[in-house]
Image (cartoon, rainbow, N blue to C red):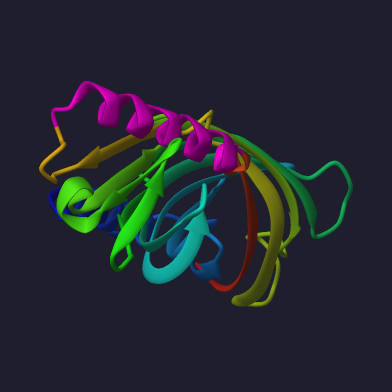
Amino acid sequence: MKKFLFASGFLLLSVSCAFAQKDTGIAVKASTLGAGVEVIKGVSDKLEARLGLNWFSYDHDSTEAGIKYDIDLDLLSVGLLLDYRPFDSNFFLSAGVLWNDNELDLTAKYAGTVTIGDNTYTSSQAGTVRGNLSFDDFAPYIGLGWRSKLGSNSSWSFTFELGVLYQGSPNVSLTADGSLASNSAFLADLEKERSQLDDDLDDYKYYPVVSIGLVKKF
């Protein structure tokens, strides 16, 4: 929550400054990074800079490494991007970096017994199995999109973008709080489970970005 408030305050300050500038836009977006707000500033005829905040939370069930988990997905990122227009058109290429606080929290859902690593354990032995998946703090981004120039006649513009965020290989942790939580054999099985979970979730290091939105130009 503190991180969200800090990021929001930083962006609101940028928005306030933007209203005093010409060749500036404020975008409201929906994307695979969550709901978003961006400040867009013209740098030259072919170059524009963007500062944006994205956030979203979502809960769902998924089976990973043979265990059914309740997954809590929290997305939070602040991006600084440059858009380059190679042609005299609305098409642009984009590159930049995001401060990335995206993460997954996992809680195992099972009744009776659960297989962890190579062995099966009762609910009292394993207890509550929890996992966390986090990524690099800074993630490079490349993309392409369509948006009219800030200096064009229309005061409103539609924006559309496709891209990919490289978050790095995920950092996966897995813990349990049952009666065998400190048992060496159980911990070895838990590490095997964590390693398999790490392999299953490795594709998350490349995160596809699709976004649409509206831009108000000043």
**Residue 68: x %, y % from top left:** 43, 62
Q: Quadrant of the N terminus?
A: bottom left
Residue placed most toward the observer, 45 or 25: 25
Q: Residue at x 38, y 41 (%)?
A: 133
Residue placed most toward the observer, 74 or 27: 74
Q: Residue furthest right?
A: 87
Q: Is residue 47 left or right of residue 106?
A: right
Query: Does 28 sit above or below residue 8?
Result: below
Q: Residue at x 33, y 54 (%)?
A: 106
Q: How many numbered discs sit on the rendered protein? A: 0
**Residue 158: x %, y % from top left:** 67, 75
Q: Residue at x 51, y 52 (%)?
A: 66
Q: What main secondary structure does the magenta stretch of the protein show?
A: helix
Query: Does 81 sit above or below residue 138?
Result: below
> Which span is picked out in magenta?
182-202
The quadrant where residue 148 appears: bottom right
**Residue 110: x %, y % from top left:** 33, 65
Residue placed most toward the observer, 20 or 133: 133
**Residue 211: x %, y % from top left:** 62, 65
The quadrant where residue 184 appears: top left
Q: Is any atom of residue 77 visible in this view? A: no
Residue 4 sits inside the magenta stretch: no
Residue placed most toward the observer, 174 or 124: 124
